[in-house]
C-alpha cells in the first residue's frame, strides 16, 4: 500500500477530530478548558480514559515486549487495578470534598505555598517527560511507515502533528477531549480486535490452540517467582499499584477528567469501571503480542520489540489491515498527547501563574494568557520528542515506567504525607526533600548490586522514592491540631 494513501487516511482522521472539536468547543471558556464545566458524562470519561491510559506505547511496545518478558506485564496490570480502587475510594472523595480545579491545590493549605508549587512542578516535569516519550514512539513509527517516503524530516513530522493537536484542543480543552478521547479509544480497540482476528485466521488457529502454542514457546508466562529478580510478582504488583496512584491518582491530566464528572458517585463508577476494563484490554494486547511472535516465527521475521507490530501490520498484512493499523496507531497517539498538553497548560496557569486568582486581568486577557501557555507547552513537546529521537531506545515502555519512578515518587510521598499523617512540614524545606529523594534513588539504582548483591530493584523504585520523601517530610514536620480546618480553608 502506498505511503500517499496512508497519509491521506491520517489527514481524513484529523479532519474528523476537527469536526468533533468544532462541535464540542462552542461557547467554551477557561472553565470549559480546565475542567469541562464539571458536566462530563462518567461513561464517556471512563471509556475515553482507556485510550489516555494506554497510549501508543501500550499499542506497540507491550505486544513487542512479549518476546522478551512473556505475559509478565500482567503482574503490573494487577497492581494497576489495586491502584484504581484506591484512587476511587481514597483520593476522589478528597478532591470532590475540596472542590478542586487543580488537584495540587490540596497541597497549598495542607502544607504551604512552596509545597504546592513543588507538587505542581513535579507534575509538569513528570507529564512532559512521559507524554513526549509516548509521542516520540508513535511519530517515529509514522515516520518510518509513511513520512520518510515524502522526504519529510522527523522534526517537521513532529511539528505537523503537534500543530494538529493544538488546532483541536486550543478552544475546548477538557470539554473537547472527553469526546475526542472516546472516538480515539473506539478506533484503537477496533484495531486491536481486528488485527487479533486476522492473525488467528491467517495462522489457522483457535484461541485455545494459540494459547497452547504460546505456552510451548514460553510466551505466556505471567507470574515470575524468583524474589531476587526485579520482575518478581510481588514487586511488580506493588509497583503497579503505586505507579497507578502516581500516574493517575495524583496526575492532573487524568484527574481533571475524573473531577469534571458531575458528582463523586459517578466519578467513582468511572474509576472502578476503568480498573476492570484495563485488565481485559491489556490482556488482549499481551495476547496479540503472543500472536505476533508466533506469526514472526512462522514467517521468519527479524523485527523485534517496538518494531514488530508495525512491521507485521504494514508489510505482511492485507492493505485494509494496514489502514486499520495506522488509524488505530494515531488513535493511540492523540489521547496521550492532547490530554497531556491540556493538563500541563491547566497546571501552569492555575498552579504556577495563579491565573484564577488574578484580579488584574479580565476573562479575555486570561484566555489569551492560557492560549500562549498552550503554545509554549507544544514547543516544549517538540524539543523533548527530538531528545528521545536522539536517544533512540528500542523499547519505550521500560523507559517511561523507569522515569515515572523518579519523577512521580516525590508527588506520591507528598500526597501520602498529607493524607495519612497529622503533621505539617516546614514549607521552606519541602522542595529540598522532594529533590533529594530522587537523587538518592538514582544512586541506589545505579549501585544496587553493590548495596543489595543479587537482590534486584525494578519498578518498585517508585515506592522507595515515595518512602524517602515521606521520611524526609516526617523529619521536618511538627504535629497539627486541626487538620479539618486546614481542609476547609483550602476550599476557599
Image (cartoon, grey):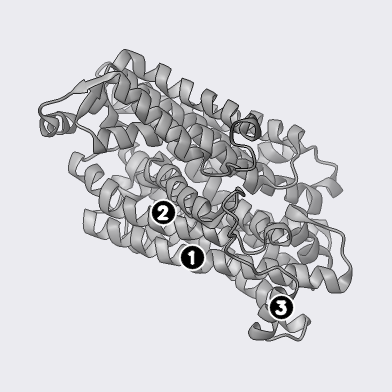
> With respect to residue 293, does 133 lie above or below?
above
Give the CA distance from mark 1 to mark 3.
Answer: 22 Å
Give the CA distance from mark 2 to mark 1.
Answer: 22 Å
Q: Residue 158 placed where, x, y %?
A: 68, 39
Nearer mark to the viewer, of 2 and 3? 3
Upstream in sequence: badge 1 or badge 3: 3
> With respect to residue 105, does 91 lie above or below?
below
Residue name at image x 61 percent, y 43 percent: 456
Q: Secondary structure at mark 2?
A: helix
Q: Is residue 368 visible?
A: no
Residue name at image x 47 percent, y 46 percent: 243
Q: Residue 378 placed where, x, y %?
A: 56, 33
Q: Nearer the viewer, residue 195 or 282?
A: 282
Q: Secondary structure at mark 3?
A: helix
Residue for badge 1: 279
Residue for badge 3: 198
Q: Are marks 2 and 3 in contact (CB under 8 Å)?
A: no
Query: 10 Å neighbourhood of mark 2: few (<14), some, or many (≥20)?
Result: many
Q: Secondary structure at mark 1?
A: helix
Upstream in sequence: badge 2 or badge 1: 2
Residue name at image x 34 percent, y 62 percent: 272
Residue for badge 2: 178
Amino acid at each position: 500500500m502506498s505511503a500517499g494513501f496512508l497519509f491521506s487516511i491520517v489527514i481524513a482522521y484529523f479532519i474528523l477530530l476537527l469536526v468533533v472539536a468544532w462541535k464540542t468547543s462552542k461557547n467554551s471558556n477557561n472553565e470549559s478548558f480546565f475542567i469541562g464545566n464539571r458536566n462530563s458524562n462518567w461513561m464517556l470519561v471512563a471509556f475515553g480514559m482507556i485510550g489516555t491510559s494506554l497510549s501508543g506505547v501500550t499499542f506497540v511496545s507491550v505486544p513487542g515486549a512479549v518476546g522478551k518478558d512473556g505475559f509478565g506485564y500482567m503482574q503490573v496490570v494487577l497492581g494497576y487495578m489495586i491502584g484504581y480502587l484506591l484512587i476511587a475510594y481514597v483520593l476522589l472523595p478528597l478532591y470532590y470534598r475540596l472542590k478542586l480545579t487543580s488537584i495540587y491545590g490540596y497541597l497549598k493549605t495542607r502544607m504551604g505555598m512552596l509545597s504546592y508549587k513543588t507538587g505542581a512542578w513535579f507534575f509538569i516535569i513528570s507529564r512532559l517527560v512521559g507524554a513526549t516519550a509516548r509521542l516520540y514512539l508513535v511519530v517515529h513509527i509514522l515516520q518510518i511507515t509513511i513520512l520518510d517516503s515524502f522526504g519529510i524530516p522527523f522534526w517537521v513530522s513532529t511539528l505537523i502533528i503537534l500543530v494538529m493537536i493544538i488546532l483541536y484542543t486550543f478552544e475546548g480543552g477538557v470539554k473537547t477531549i472527553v469526546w475526542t478521547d472516546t472516538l480515539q479509544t473506539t478506533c484503537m480497540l477496533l484495531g486491536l480486535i481486528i488485527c487479533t482476528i486476522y492473525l488467528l485466521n491467517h495462522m489457522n488457529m483457535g484461541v485455545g490452540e494459540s494459547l497452547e502454542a504460546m505456552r510451548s514457546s514460553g510466551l505466556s508466562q505471567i507470574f515470575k517467582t524468583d524474589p531476587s529478580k526485579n520482575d518478581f510478582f510481588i514487586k511488580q504488583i506493588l509497583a503497579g499499584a503505586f505507579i497507578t496512584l502516581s500516574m493517575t491518582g495524583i496526575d492532573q491530566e487524568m484527574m481533571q477528567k475524573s473531577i469534571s464528572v458531575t458528582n463523586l458517585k459517578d466519578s467513582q463508577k468511572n474509576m472502578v469501571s476503568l480498573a476492570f476494563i484495563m485488565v481485559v484490554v491489556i490482556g488482549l494486547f499481551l495476547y496479540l503480542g503472543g500472536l505476533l511472535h508466533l506469526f514472526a516465527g512462522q514467517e521468519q521475521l527479524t523485527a523485534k520489540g517496538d518494531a514488530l507490530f508495525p512491521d507485521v501490520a504494514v508489510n505482511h498484512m492485507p492493505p485494509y489491515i494496514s489502514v486499520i493499523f495506522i488509524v488505530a496507531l494515531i488513535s493511540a497517539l492523540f489521547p496521550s498527547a492532547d490530554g497531556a498538553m491540556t493538563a500541563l497548560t491547566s497546571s501552569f496557569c492555575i498552579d504556577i501563574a495563579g491565573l484564577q486568582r488574578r484580579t488584574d486581568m479580565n476573562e479575555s486577557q486570561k484566555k489569551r494568557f492560557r492560549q500562549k501557555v498552550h503554545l509554549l507547552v507544544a514547543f516544549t513537546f517538540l524539543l523533548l520528542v527530538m531528545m528521545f529521537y536522539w536517544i533512540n531506545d528500542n523499547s519505550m515502555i521500560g523507559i517511561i515506567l523507569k522515569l515515572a519512578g523518579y519523577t512521580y515518587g516525590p508527588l506520591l510521598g507528598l500526597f501520602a504525607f498529607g493524607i495519612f499523617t497529622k503533621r505539617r512540614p516546614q514549607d521552606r524545606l519541602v522542595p529540598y526533600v522532594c529533590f533529594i529523594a530522587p537523587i538518592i534513588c538514582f544512586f541506589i539504582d545505579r549501585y544496587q548490586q553493590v548495596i543489595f548483591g543479587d537482590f534486584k530493584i525494578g519498578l518498585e523504585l517508585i515506592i522507595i522514592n515515595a518512602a524517602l520523601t515521606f521520611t524526609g517530610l516526617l523529619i521536618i514536620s511538627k504535629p497539627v491540631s486541626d487538620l479539618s480546618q486546614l481542609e476547609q480553608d483550602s476550599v476557599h
